[in-house]
Amino acid sequence: MSGLLMPKADDATMSRRSDIVTALRAIVPGEGVVDATNAMRVFESDALTAYRQLPLVVVLPQTVAQVSRVLKYCHENNVKVVPRGSGTSLSGGALPLEDAVLLVMSRFNQILEIDYPNRVAVVQPGVTNLGITKAVEHEGFYYAPDPSSQIACSIGGNVAENSGGVHCLKYGLTANNVLGLEMVLITGEVVRLGGKHLDSEGYDLLGLMTGSEGLLGVVTEVTVRILQKPATARALMVGFPTSEQAGKCVADIIAGGIIPGGMEMMDRPAIHAAEDFVHAGYPLDVEALLIIELDGPVVEVDHLISMVEAIAYKNGASTCVISQSEEERMAFWAGRKAAFPAVGRISPDYLCMDGTIPRKELPKVLAGMRELSEKYGLRVANVFHAGDGNLHPLILYDANIPEELHKAEDFGADILRLCVKVGGVLTGEHGVGVEKRELMPEMFNEIDLNQQIRVKCAFDDKHLLNPGKVFPQLHRCAELGRMHVHRGQVPFPEIPRF
Amino acid sequence: MTIFTPKTEDEIVEAVQWALSENAPVEIVGHGSKRNLGRPLQTEHTIALSEYSGVTLYEPDELVLSAKAGTSVAELETLLEENGQAFQFEPMDYGPLLGQAAGQGTFGGLLATNLCGPRRLKSGSARDHVLGVRVVSGRGELFKSGGRVVKNVTGYDLSKGMANSWGTLGIATEITFKVLPAPETETTLVVRGLADDEAARAMAIAMGSSGEVASAAHLPLNVSGRVIDGDLKGDASTLLRLEGFAPSVNDRAAMLKGLLVSAGTIVDISGDTSRKLWQEVRDVIPFADGTEQPVWRVSMVPMEAYKLVASLRMGAAVDAFYDWQGGLVWLRMEGEPEAEAVRALIKKYGGGHATLVRASTSVRAALPVFEPQPVPLAALSKRLKQQFDPSGILNPGRMVAGV
């Protein structure tokens, strides 16, 4: 892809490749080490497929002891390591490096314990997100965070990315649903954070680990909260003549004390693309469509449906359909869930962005996007997690037209800048990875970024874990360790007692 | 001795830079309401955030609130209540337990000690609701992390990193939290007369049902009479709190009564009495006796915790009650803190951690107040401290000696 600069491959490591492969084979026997180019090809990218790179070697450990020994070896021998779960990252978080061992955790695929009285499941990191729900649903339980890739993405990857999903305003993100981790530090030390009990005795290392994009440690076991499935769920499909009215409706629902299980918005291009594709029955004469799902006991859902319906009409809804059956509810969602492939049908290629904005800024951001769309000559369709402000603009382009990818990337970067400008952030759930790395200074100044890198230094002072991700530039830890304040040089040496 | 009371963020930065230049450790406080919690400090100087206060952003429709660190939590709660909202994690107030007035805590202290309450199982603690922070590190640098939106994975979550750091990593100057609608209605079902193990099972059944129980606590016989003016005396009380819109609360209450019909007699407590009951459970009012008798806060696996209490009772006089479906145990020791016994039993029964939240200054200086960590984890915590506060000037030794 256009000019992605990764850390320069270390010649010394490259020249030791066969020694490294031999050493890894001694730790992980059999088919657990893959070094043939053809066999490594399947690992050369994650779900951000525009970036591809063969790793130095792939290792697929099966035990915690093996993970520990691999990391210890790499630490002692200054070999970089890129951890990988299912490889569904949308930001290039698991993109291999030419001079790094790719540590694939897919063989950690066992559910270790399901404890219903304490409502937790203890699983290995390679278990898929949906796999946890599948293992407990016969007892009426589920695991709440549901990223759209849940059929494939691993829980270890969810921890690395702090994955969300459409239900997170009500049920929280991965960080709110993980109780404990076992992880291996780059030194090979195995530590446990939290467990089946709540909170920790010291610093919230669990909170720091969640969303750290594989830069702090390798997760080998995850303890998650499981919840009783809501008794019922019903949805409303509401169309509005303007996005302002839809936005006001969302605000009024929340101001009314209602936190829906899910609340999704689509703009006109997204509605049309989805309707053409799956014929969900979406109205085509509206500018904004809301899908609002309420879940819980039947009487509660019935009660809230009527409240939400009144709020929708008060805000000028032109259509409002309430699901009368599970089939109808699923049909409402079918269009929304198919929005990405639907856009894929009307355009040879698209880029999916992932900013979050304060909800009230939506009309301003949509207007800004229309201007940018004209400026770049590229179409954009929007789906929006309206409850939590997470916006996914899909930028339509054709990779076969010279410079169009580059234009699409610039357009995307401008959208994210706009998100930050209105008080939002660069990424709501896809992660920074390599994709948004260079945009970090839009949100953070040098001091902010340096303090984040110092956290990295506490966990991995040689910067061996997943280098080239998240940070535009990783300063050496020793460099960051210098103190710039010395006696007599502070602004107010004789500080008053204010 | 110098007490700095900065009124601006710049003055907070300057105070830390002064401490750095003098190599003088400082104690960080708000109003000092939790000063008697944690290891006693030996610092000569203090930075008090009490005059750096005020709400900087509150947008009810956006479910977001920002305030300066010295803002009183009680004032924030009043403001939220006026708008039908609340901190859903209902931060406890340590004041009464520690022999201080209620309502003294600050916003900064709330995050630094990761406060929460009886809704912990369902709604999390402060760390689950913090969205963003501005912080002055021990390097005298102001940094920010997070933002004002719920969904944000841009960079490491240093906001969570500040939770439960007890002022040892940095001084949070301004904090942004997610706020949520306050429940319209609340009712508590009280199951009478259960033994601790029976209560643990009843609470597990209730919490694992579709009744959406917001909180589950158990007050054994000798504690039960010490809440809501003695209304529950005479029998142990197992409390199940239901919240939400009235039709839903009524429906779920009926369902749960059916589910627990064989457990024991069930009575209802509703409205303000229910709210008062949970506030007293939250603030450990049964042990707010004005003494310095040791009190432990123990977090364990819910179904194991009663075993710890039963074992302890074989060797020591102990008063105990449970929150969080049994997973939070408040222990008041009649004699010595028995730290080794308590911690050995936690390990035996599935793990967890114990904090000696109340004890005399000399006891807190001599015993590890916080659960000691295994060597690699302790080393990692120490490295983290060094990265935020390399000179060790912020609340040194507040959590662990030398950190």
Image: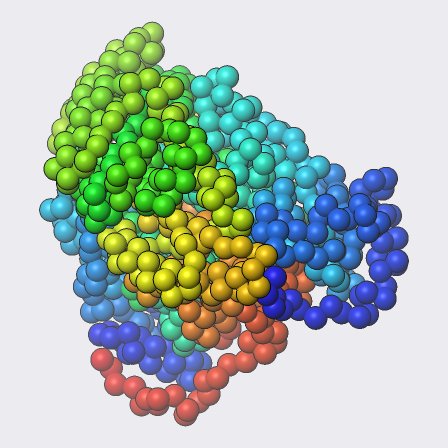
**Residue A370 x/y as whole percent:** 33, 58
Q: Nearer the viewer, residue B272 or B228?
A: B272
Q: Residue at x 63, y 38 (%)?
A: A126
The quadrant in which the C terminus of chain A is found is bottom left
Furthest-top residue in this view: B262
- The answer to whether A442 appears left or right of A454 in the picture is left
- The answer to whether B164 appears left or right of A309 in the picture is right
The quadrant in which the N terminus of chain A is found is bottom right
Above or below, comparing residue A414 to residue B188 in the picture: below
Above or below, comparing residue A98 to residue B4 in the picture: above
- The answer to whether A387 appears left or right of A413 in the picture is left
Residue B6 in view of the camera = yes
Q: Residue at x 14, y 31 (%)?
A: A310
Q: Residue at x 45, y 85 (%)?
A: A485
Residue B302 in view of the camera = no
**Residue B259 x/y as whole percent:** 33, 11
Furthest-front residue in this view: A401
Furthest-bottom residue in this view: A488
Q: Residue at x 81, y 48 (%)?
A: A38
**Residue A278 x/y as whole percent:** 43, 30
Above or below, comparing residue A64 to residue B59 in the picture: above
- Which quarter of the picture shows residue B327? top left
**Residue A282 x/y as whole percent:** 32, 32
Badge count: 0
Image coloring type? rainbow
Q: Nearer the viewer, residue B20 or A483?
A: A483
Q: Nearer the viewer, residue A481 or B285?
A: A481
- The answer to whether A169 appears left or right of A93 in the picture is left
- Which quarter of the picture shows residue A132? top right
